Image (cartoon, coloured by chain):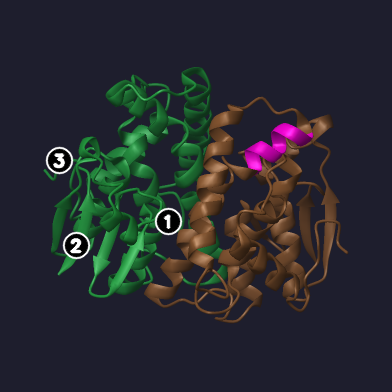
Chain colours: A green, B brown
């Protein structure tokens, strides 16, 4: 059975749990206690030398990094729908995987980490990046149902968690009505689960 | 003809120029003067709302983000070699696209930007991240010819520029012999060009 090395409140882990649920896949959760340093043990570093969750194990295959895991699940268990393989639509989807790994991670996700876990960051810079990204998303989504391809893809799954969780970092989404509409559409997808699996 | 909106000294633009050269593709460079703010004009923001180079235009297709452009070029003009489409190898390659977009960008690339352009950053934190990433790469490359798949892929092209340019940021690669060996192997690839196109 698929194993997910997981932290419940991590938005990156939630991306993977959401994808697994959207695909209707059974899996086993292996909770990793960050406070106990379980992500820095020799055993865990063998799975992921970067010492980060999530990690997915599927038989002999071990994949680290939320975005890469979404690609794995889409290609292995999904259809072309979740990740098209033609040059143009695939690269359009990958654009948003980079936004998820960079702008979202160092913007809304960093601000959330600061408020939830007292993480030391340059708060002002992260808040600025958060709002810049939200503005770009809002404009992009003003004429689209989903981020790309007129249907849900892993671009949406990669960007959704930390954007939907922005209020955890005291960032209101009020100014971004198209983002709010998109969040509501994602929540209507068959198989949708929230961060706590509800 | 393919158009690349380009900044010569940007490692992210160099990734794309390197890929275009490895694939033997002709293209036109459109230099963007960052000092004149040409990446923040209304016209440029229509191409890339994030206001960043590189952007690639190929007929009607416009792709932003270095990693996404590598995916586009590999799928459109390369063979399966540069980006396999099976679940496991594809996601292994994507792991390194995330490292390029996140750890490398906020480590070696940020330190280089600080020393070349006086960019204001948390230098100590970026240097720490740079060395952590180099250690991980060095260990990974100690038993491999390339990053994944026993052959050059877009994983190598995405990670190579800022790693090879680390000395611009006064980061010596002396401690990382396997990284140095890998850099030398990349330089031997048919079609290889350096940052200045030599």
In this figure, which residue is indicated by the disc labeled 1?
A: A150
Q: Residue at x 50, y 46 (%)?
A: B132
Task: Decide: is B124 above or below B198.
Answer: above
Cβ–Cβ under 8 Å for marks 3 and 2: no
Quickly name the residue at label 3: A196
Using the rendered view, name the quadrant where residue A25 is placed: bottom left
Q: Is residue A67 left or right of residue B84?
A: left
Instruction: Determine whether A53 is above or below B120 in the image.
Output: below
Judging by the rendered image, the residue that carries numbered circle 2 is A3
The CA span between labels 3 and 2 is 18 Å
Of B182 and A193, nearer the camera is B182
Report which quarter residue B183 is drawn in.
Answer: bottom right
Task: Point out the stretch of residues depicted in magenta.
Answer: B109-116
Quick one: quadrant of the C terminus of chain A? top left
Q: Is residue A173 among what the camera can see?
A: no
What is the x, y in percent for residue B9? 80, 47
């Amino acid at each position: 059975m698929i194993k997910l090395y997981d932290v419940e409140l991590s938005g990156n882990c939630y991306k993977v749990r959401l994808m697994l649920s959207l695909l209707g896949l059974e899996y086993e959760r292996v909770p990793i206690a960050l406070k106990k340093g379980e992500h820095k043990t020799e055993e865990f570093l063998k799975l992921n030398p970067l010492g980060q969750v999530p990690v997915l194990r599927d038989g002999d295959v071990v994949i680290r990094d939320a975005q890469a895991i979404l690609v794995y699940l889409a290609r292995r268990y999904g259809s072309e729908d979740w990740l098209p393989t033609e040059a143009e639509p695939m690269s359009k989807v990958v654009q948003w995987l980079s936004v998820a790994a960079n702008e979202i991670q160092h913007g809304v996700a960093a601000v959330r980490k600061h408020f939830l876990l007292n993480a030391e960051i340059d708060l002002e810079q992260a808040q600025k990046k958060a709002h810049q990204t939200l503005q770009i998303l809002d404009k992009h989504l003003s004429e689209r149902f989903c981020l790309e391809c007129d249907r849900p893809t892993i671009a949406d799954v990669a960007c959704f968690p930390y954007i939907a969780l922005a209020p955890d970092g005291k960032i209101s989404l009020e100014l971004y009505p198209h983002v709010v509409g998109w969040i509501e559409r994602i929540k209507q997808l068959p198989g949708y689960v929230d961060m706590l699996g509800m």
